[in-house]
Amino acid sequence: KNQVEQSPQSLIILEGKNCTLQCNYTVSPFSNLRWYKQDTGRGPVSLTIMTFSENTKSNGRYTATLDADTKQSSLHITASQLSDSASYICVVSIVAAGNKLTFGGGTRVLVKP
Amino acid sequence: DGGITQSPKYLFRKEGQNVTLSCEQNLNHDAMYWYRQDPGQGLRLIYYSQIVNDFQKGDIAEGYSVSREKKESFPLTVTSAQKNPTAFYLCASSLTGSSEKLFFGSGTQLSVL
């Protein structure tokens, strides 16, 4: 069973609208939780990095939140643009495994005009 | 420009053939990684290297081999023993091996003829 689960698997939103992506993890304690953006056919690019003690981190129109008690993170995209069409990947660094990185399967977002 | 360069972008393998994927970085990073990405799945670690002339197996090393003769280069060979090689391969690097922020290349799509 994957230790990092993302939902939904995919979603379609209209340009200008907001959306929220979810990431649930089952292992703790962890060091960092990262969100990456991956354009089709490209490598992932880091959006935000949060330690276990941080609740929120923003990067422009992207805002990540973290609830260490419920082991959930979310990525909120505000006023979506066509360029936001991509896959968004949640990555947890697990202390117990020597800071091994565990990747979620990603959420594919399609922004339509 | 600093970054990670992967080549080729697309690669086709005949049955029984070994193929090598190139990965070069000019970020002066100590650690380099190879991941495999299959549709809808999280990235899986094939091999990683924390220092020149040293590398470790990841979660799915069978059928793959690597070398780290230079700090800048970390080529991956997909051998004929890998029976299901069709996937998107991503190379990454980080400043050190303690799972900090990863910088990814743009990937190589490997397909079987």
Image (tube, helix red, strand yellow):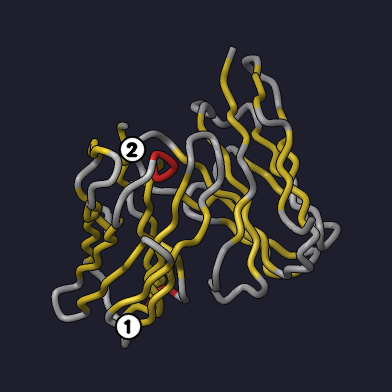
**Separation of residues labelled 1 and 2 (CA atoms):** 27 Å
Residue B44 visible: yes
Q: Identify the image quadrant of residue A57.
A: bottom left
Say which mark, if any, is on residue B22. none
Same chain for mark 1 and mark 2? The answer is: no
Residue sitting at the far top: B113
What residue type is disc 2 on? Answer: Gly
User: How many C-alpha atoms fall within 10 Å of the one at disc 2: few (<14), some, or many (≥20)?
Assistant: few
Residue B95: % across, % down: 67, 72
Q: Secondary structure at mark 1?
A: loop
Relative side of A24 to A99, left or right: left
Q: Closest to the observer: A110 or B78?
A: A110
Residue A7: % across, % down: 20, 49
Q: Closest to the observer: B76 or A50?
A: A50
Relative side of A63 to B22, left or right: left
Q: In the image, is residue A14 above or below residue A29?
A: above
What residue type is disc 1 on? Answer: Phe
Q: Which residue is mark 1?
A: A52
- Which residue: 44% across, 57% down? A36
Residue sitting at the far right: B70
Residue sitting at the far bottom: A53
- Which residue: 20% across, 45% down? A8
Q: In the image, is residue A59 above or below residue A77?
A: below
User: How many C-alpha atoms fall within 10 Å of the one at disc 1: few (<14), some, or many (≥20)?
Assistant: some
Relative side of B49 to A31, left or right: right
Contact, mark 1 vs mark 2 (Cβ under 8 Å): no
Residue A15: % across, % down: 29, 40
Q: Which residue is mark 2?
A: B40
